Amino acid sequence: MNLDFNIESKKLALIQWLTSLNDVSMIDKILELKNKESKDWWNETSDEEKESIEKGLEDANSGKLKPHSEIRKKYEKWL
């Protein structure tokens, strides 16, 4: 619960600071950060990565899965 209070306290401090901020360049930087953080990661992913993810989802949906323990055993020497 203390962590939640700390986060809420930080949010309130930021809100108070933002309401008094008159530096347009700083506001623009904050908006740029917000927009960067809210971008959909899928749109930033390469076609090759998207194909790999979609293949993995198809395999998972069709039951073509192996247990983690089996894969770990196979690649143990590299872990």
Image (cartoon, helix red, strand yellow):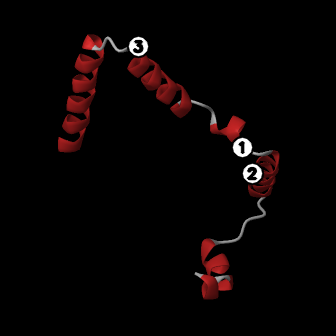
What residue is disc 2 on?
Answer: 53
Tell which residue pokes out farthest to the bottom in this image.
77
Q: Earlier in the sequence, mark 1 or mark 2?
A: 1
Helix or strand or loop: what does disc 2 sit on? Answer: helix
Helix or strand or loop: what does disc 3 sit on? Answer: helix
Q: Position of residue 52 (x, y in %)?
A: 79, 54
Q: Position of residue 51 (x, y in %)?
A: 82, 49
Q: Earlier in the sequence, mark 1 or mark 3?
A: 3
| Quadrant containing the C terminus in the rendered view | bottom right
Give the alpha-carbon distance from disc 1 to disc 2, as whole Å.
10 Å
Residue at 71%, 35% in the rendered image: 43
Which quarter of the picture shows residue 36? top right
Q: Position of residue 10 (x, y in %)?
A: 24, 31
Whether residues under marks 1 and 2 lie with C-beta atoms below 8 angstroms apart, the answer is: yes
Helix or strand or loop: what does disc 1 sit on? Answer: loop
Pick the front one: 62 or 75: 75
What residue is disc 1 on?
Answer: 45
Residue at 48%, 27% in the rendered image: 34
Q: Position of residue 70 (x, y in %)?
A: 66, 79
Pick the front one: 61 or 34: 34
Residue at 68%, 84% in the rendered image: 74
The amino acid marked with disc number 3 is Val
The amino acid marked with disc number 1 is Thr
Pick the front one: 23 or 76: 23
- On residue 24, the disc is 3
| Relative height, residue 77 to residue 25 (above, below) | below
